Image (cartoon, helix red, strand yellow):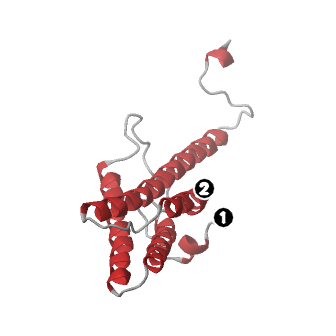
Amino acid sequence: AAKEAAEMVLADNNFASITHAVEEGRTVYDNIKKSILFILPTNGGQALTILAAVMFGFQQLPLTPVQILWVNMITAVTLALSLAFEPSEDDIMQRPPRDAHEPILSAHLIWRILFVSVILMAGTFGLFIWESARGMPIEYARTVAVNTLVVFEIFYLFNSRYITAPVLNWEGISGNRY
């Protein structure tokens, strides 16, 4: 009766199992947050690029729907899935417990999403304008734009590996084989 009423039952009578379960839970929560922090700004950057082109009255969009679909299907999904397999951060058990009512996106993280979206838009749209102004064909300018977007996403993926810690170290670059 006690096992049925309990919210958690230790199968092996070892309290270290609780510590391990807490660590795994924190890792899963962090990895979900990291995936969200990767997907939202990259999609925001794509949307802002199209929105900027429409607002400035461009007849030709910097990214075609097929290119956006390709980026979302291939790079965003593949790269975001790699964040699901991130190992635990070093300080994960030194953190205080999080408030159960705390939203997954704090004001700081929303600011980060908006900031990165604007950076992706500026780089993608800026290089599209640059190549168009140089007289390059629209296909060439779009290719530069989509490749810029993909490269930005790859660099941002490395930055998304840690929520607050810097990624510029050997572990940050090579710590996840996926």
Q: Residues within 10 Å of mark 2 (few under 14, many from 20)?
A: some
Quadrant of residue 121 within the rendered picture = bottom left
Q: Amino acid at mark 2?
A: Leu
Taking 90 as reference, is 100 left or right? left
Quadrant of residue 126 within the rendered picture = bottom left
Image vertical order of residue 137 relative to residue 122, above or below? below
Q: Quadrant of the C terminus?
A: bottom right
Residue nearer the viewer, 171 or 55: 55
Instruction: Find residue 162 and report its horizontal and vertical position in percent.
Output: 48, 62
Please report contact status of discs 2 and 1: CB closer than 8 Å, yes or no. yes
Q: Residue at x 42, y 35 (%)?
A: 100
Instruction: Find residue 58 and report its horizontal and vertical position in percent.
Output: 30, 67
Q: Dot 2: what SS?
A: helix
Q: Quadrant of the N terminus?
A: top right
Q: Residues within 10 Å of mark 1 (few under 14, many from 20)?
A: few
Question: Looking at the image, which residue sits at the far right?
Answer: 12
Q: Residue at x 36, y 74 (%)?
A: 123
How much space separates mark 2 and mark 1, taking CA atoms? 9 Å
Residue nearer the viewer, 120 or 11: 120
Residue 101 visible, this angle: yes
Instruction: Find residue 90 and report its horizontal and vertical position in percent.
Output: 53, 61
- First in residue order: circle 2 vs circle 1: 2
Image vertical order of residue 6 relative to residue 32, above or below? above
Residue 90 visible, this angle: no
Residue tagged 1: 178
Image vertical order of residue 102 relative to residue 152, above or below? above
Image vertical order of residue 105 relative to residue 7, above or below? below
Q: Dot 1: what SS?
A: loop
Q: Residue at x 63, y 45 (%)?
A: 20
Residue tagged 2: 81
